[in-house]
Amino acid sequence: MQIVIHVGLSGHATAFQLDEDGYGSLRRYFERARAGLARDPDREEILRDLEQSIGEKLAVLPHAGGRVIAGHEVDSVLGQVGTVDPGSDNGHARRPPPMRPWRFCRIEQDKWIGGVCTGLAARSGVRVDWVRTIFILATVFTGGMMALVYLALVLALPVLRTRDDYEDMCRLSP
């Protein structure tokens, strides 16, 4: 005999039919999420968002509306959503994010001329259009000296293809 449990999730009009294992996995997931978010003032909103996300992923399973969803399928969806990790912040002072290593490079993705401004924007966390504006203004006010600096940077800096490559490099560096 198979036990089927109908589960309604936020944002979904129809109930999902889960087998007993799938329901148990889903229930434990939300119990851990509630416990982990106990001190979070946005706990209910986060839980609703989780329910909606899980429901969207369950809804795209083949024939999800008309069949019982097995426990291993629910586990797979929960793996895609990931665990709820509120961090170690329990209302105490937050630590500043770790400093990024000083890695300068040129990035070819979205470059105008040599990719120097894109690389500087990635390094500093500033939008690239601001960096370009500063470079143009500095070139005008220094009588073209910044154009020479730009040219030197084009020749000296290593080249990366995308901004994601830069993020990977920063993540891997000590």
Image (cartoon, helix red, strand yellow):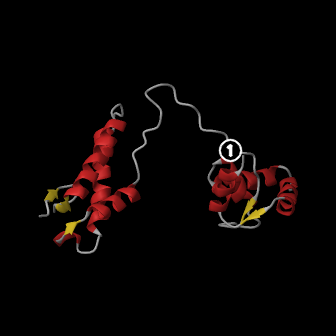
Q: Which residue is mark 1?
A: 100
Q: Nearer the viewer, residue 29 or 58?
A: 29
Residue 171: x %, y % from top left: 65, 51
Q: Amino acid at mark 1?
A: Arg
Q: Is residue 134 left or right of residue 76?
A: right
Residue sitting at x 75%, y 46%: 102
Most extreme residue toward the bottom is 62
Determine crowd level at label 1: few under 14, some 14-19, many 20+ residues with C-alpha closer than 10 A. Answer: few
Residue 64: x %, y % from top left: 23, 70
Residue 18: x %, y % from top left: 20, 61
Residue sitting at x 47%, y 33%: 88
SS under mark 1:
loop
Q: Is residue 123 left or right of residue 148?
A: left
Residue sitting at x 66%, y 67%: 109
Q: Nearer the viewer, residue 17 or 55?
A: 17
Q: Looking at the figure, which quarter contains the N terminus? A: bottom left
Residue 151: x %, y % from top left: 85, 61
**Residue 105 placement: quadrant:** bottom right
Relative to residue 44, is residue 61 depicted above or below?
below
Most extreme residue toward the left is 1
Relative to residue 120, is residue 58 depicted above or below?
below
Q: Is residue 89 left or right of residue 143?
A: left
Q: Nearer the viewer, residue 9 or 154?
A: 9
